[in-house]
Image: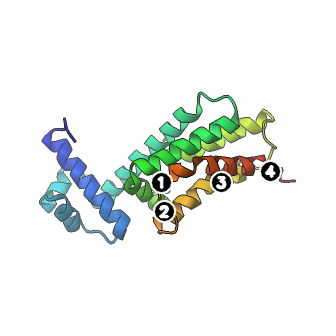
Amino acid sequence: MAGMGKAEDTKARIERAALTLFVARGVAETTTREIAMAASIAEGTIYRYFPSKEQLALNMFLGHHRALAEALDEAQRPHPSLRAKTEAIVRCYCDWADRDWTLFAYHLLNQHSFLIQVPDGTPNPVNVVREAIGRAMAAGEIPKNNVDLAAASAIGVVLQAATYKVYGRFEGPLSDHVTFFAAAAWAVLSVKEK
């Protein structure tokens, strides 16, 4: 946090304290008093930065959601083939998870609550994958299947492993398994449904 002013430092401390508590206990179960205690601030200080605990939770979700989508898009863009795009997307996703697991777990655990509140036009990680798959199907690079089924299945290869990690059924960095995940996602994308 070097180079941050006092206000930015306080806001970052509030967000990190909230994030840690939200992942451990859930958004609804966490109080602003607990966040304030964890951030070593007065409870009222939270409201200088966020109108409510719910807005704090949504802002953190949306910030990560947008940034992850933009990173995945940037990672896949230079690659000409879907096979290479798949590996780039998987590598980027795993690196994001490993860089800040608490933030990543928060996004993963709260997607069902917050996806409905994502404003139209916001970059979306799923759309990045779906569009790459759709282009590859149109070009004949992979079999023409239901693009949403293909995207869900390919994403699920990594997403389910990440979910297992959240619940302690899988340990270590996700990026240690990029080769496996990319090959498994490619195998899913190569299936001819009919």
Return the residue at label 1. Answer: 173
**Mark 3 is on which residue type?**
Ala
Q: Which label lies toward us, 4 or 3?
A: 4
Per the image, label 2 sits on a secondary structure element best described as: loop
**Cα separation between marks 4 and 3:** 13 Å
Per the image, label 4 sits on a secondary structure element best described as: loop
The reply, left or right, for residue 91 in relation to residue 7 is: right
Binning the other alpha carbons within 10 Å of mark 1 as few (below 14), some (14 to 19) or many (20 upward) gives some
Mark 3 or mark 2: name the one nearer the start of the chain. Answer: 3
**Cα separation between marks 2 and 1:** 7 Å
Per the image, label 1 sits on a secondary structure element best described as: loop
Binning the other alpha carbons within 10 Å of mark 3 as few (below 14), some (14 to 19) or many (20 upward) gives some
**Mark 1 is on which residue type?**
Pro
The reply, left or right, for residue 179 in relation to residue 1 is: right
Binning the other alpha carbons within 10 Å of mark 2 as few (below 14), some (14 to 19) or many (20 upward) gives few
**Cα separation between marks 3 and 1:** 22 Å
Above/below status of 129 relative to 42: above
Binning the other alpha carbons within 10 Å of mark 4 as few (below 14), some (14 to 19) or many (20 upward) gives few
**Mark 4 is on which residue type?**
Val
Q: Which mark is residue 191?
A: 4
- Is residue 121 visible in the rendered image? The answer is no
**Cα separation between marks 3 and 2:** 23 Å
Mark 1 or mark 4: name the one nearer the start of the chain. Answer: 1
Q: For residue 35, what is the image quadrant?
A: bottom left
- The image position of residue 67, as x and y in percent, is 44, 41
Q: Which label lies toward us, 1 or 4?
A: 1
Per the image, label 3 sits on a secondary structure element best described as: helix
